[in-house]
Amino acid sequence: ETSGLLLIAKKKSALKSLQDQFRERETGKTYLALVRGRWPSKLKVLDQPLHKYLLPDGERRVRVVEAAHPDAMRAVTLVAVRKHLPAPSGLEAVCPDGLTLLEVTIKTGRTHQIRVHLSQAGFPIVGDDKYGDFDFNRLLAKAGLRRMFLHAWRLRLTHPISGQSMELHSE
């Protein structure tokens, strides 16, 4: 459901090198996320452990847990306000504080990390059908906005063959 960059390796050796970089946290991944409301500029670091679990139907879900939880995995998300936006036309009454476009950099790479951290902070990603504001999403769908507003915007990595530092963008 996330738009933006998709990295594909053409050779097995390149794939292994890239997987190693991701596993060792040697890459830099930054996303753009649109959230409902006015994100507080002081809130820049979300450092909350996450726990992955399965619903009875087998669907994966994630939630914030206490650090002492036996299955807690540390998760760190950095957040910067990129722009405050007005509410979509016709939705001003249900979105009086408008929307905020965020730059979100993950320092760890946990399943659904950004979605869960932003939702836990009270600012779910617009259009998120798992951790979002379902009533607001229904109103947006009626207005023609039927997607999750999370975009893989920037990726920093080392080229697996040349060793050259690279920064990729998807506008």
Image (spheres, rainbow, N blue to C red):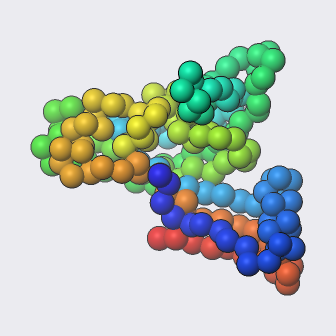
Question: Between residues 137 and 40, which one lies in front from this camera angle?
Answer: 137
Horizontal side of residue 159 vs 98, given as left or right: right
- Taking 60 as reference, is 16 left or right? right
Q: Nearer the viewer, residue 121 or 55?
A: 55
**Which residue is depicted at the point 83% across and 52% down?**
23
Where residue 17 sits: x, y (%)? 86, 68
**Residue 61 in the image: x percent, y percent?**
58, 30
Q: Is residue 135 above or below residue 66?
A: below
Does residue 110 lie above or below 12 as drawn? above
The residue most toward the front is 57
Residues 157 and 18: in front is 18
Query: Looking at the image, which residue sits at the far bottom?
Result: 162
| Residue 139 visible in the displayed image | yes
Outermost residue to the left: 90
Above-or-below relation of 21 to 161: above
**Drawn side of residue 98 relative to residue 170, left or right:** left
Q: Quadrant of residue 96?
A: top left
Q: How many marks?
A: 0
Position of residue 153 measured from the top left corner of the image (x, y, whole percent) = 54, 63
